[in-house]
Image (spheres, rainbow, N blue to C red):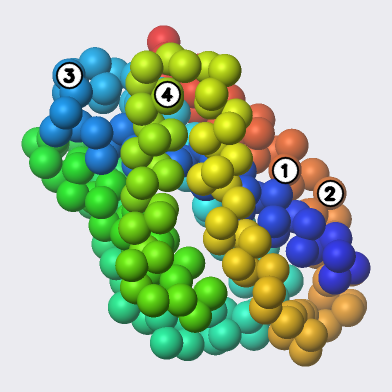
Amino acid sequence: MEALWLTVLGVLTVGYFALAGFDYGSGLLLPFRNRDETSRLVNPFFLGNEVWLVAAIGVLFAAFPRLEGELLSGAHSTFTLVLAGLVLFMAAVQLRLWWWLVFTGALMVSVGWGLFLAHLLHAPWPVAFVMPVLFAVHGWVFQARQWKLFPVTALLCALPIPLAFSSIDVTGLMAHNDTLSLLAWVAIPIIPLVVLVQWSIVAISSR
């Protein structure tokens, strides 16, 4: 049961960083590219991409209720930065606000995830710049339509935090086995459901 939930959490987390990475990367590139064109390419995707994050957080709280404390310990300011950046980025894109607000939100999110990576690895803070650089490269590949490179940059964005996260010992941090058995009925369809929701949002937004 532990392996099942770790797999589900891992897939959702990898999906989030692989898909949302080009959103944040495109936002980071706004000062250097045609802003209208960049926004037009991102708009159909960014809401669907965030669905993966919502699903991952739901799995984290349901299956690993005591892991939250481990993750937040010493990283409260980092998560505050990520959440503030997410709110700013999504509001700025959705409401068609000034481009520098989109850029600022993307920068806050990417630096926040970079700081979280440094926190997981117990590494010096300059490691935080790894995520903004990876997101920016991923965004450029998406904007330039370099589809042969897209799986490569998606993988580079997706792996650092899940790999660092895998070093945490979750023994004793999971929910009771009876709870996990009930939640397994959610775990089985959750990933296909997330994919369906994402493509539905993209299809509606692209009309």
Q: Residue furthest top?
A: 207
Q: Earlier in the sequence, mark 3 or mark 1?
A: 3
Lower sequence index among marks 2 and 3: 3
Q: Which residue is mark 1?
A: 191
Q: Which mark is residue 188?
A: 2
| Distance (Cα) linking label 4 and label 2 | 31 Å
For residue 171, what is the image quadrant? bottom right
* Mark number displayed over residue 34: 3
Q: CA distance from mark 3 to mark 1?
A: 35 Å
Q: Are marks 3 and 1 in contact (CB under 8 Å)?
A: no
| Rendered residue at 39%/76% (across/down) | 124
- Report the amino acid beneath label 4: Phe
Expressed as whole percent of the image width and height from the top left, the position of residue 172 reads 77, 89
Mark 1 → mark 4, Cα distance in angstroms: 24 Å
Residue 12 location in percent, x, y? 65, 50
Return the disc, 4 or 3, that comes first in the chain's sequence. 3
In which quadrant is the N terminus drawn?
A: bottom right
Q: Which residue is mark 4?
A: 142
Please name the residue shown 34% across and 73% down the image: 125
In the depicted structure, whether residue 22 falls above or below residue 69: above
Which amino acid type is shown beneath numbered disc 1?
Ile
Q: Residue at x 60, y 67 (%)?
A: 164
The x and y percentages for residue 128 are 37, 64
Q: Does residue 152 appear in this view?
A: yes
Q: Nearer the viewer, mark 1 or mark 4?
A: 4
Dot 3 falls on a residue whose secondary structure is loop
Calculate the distance from the C-alpha at mark 2 to the C-alpha at mark 3. Answer: 42 Å
Q: Kindly state the secondary structure of the residue where label 2 is placed.
A: helix
Q: Determine which of the numbered discs, if any, sits on residue 2 in the image.
A: none
Q: Is residue 82 visible?
A: no
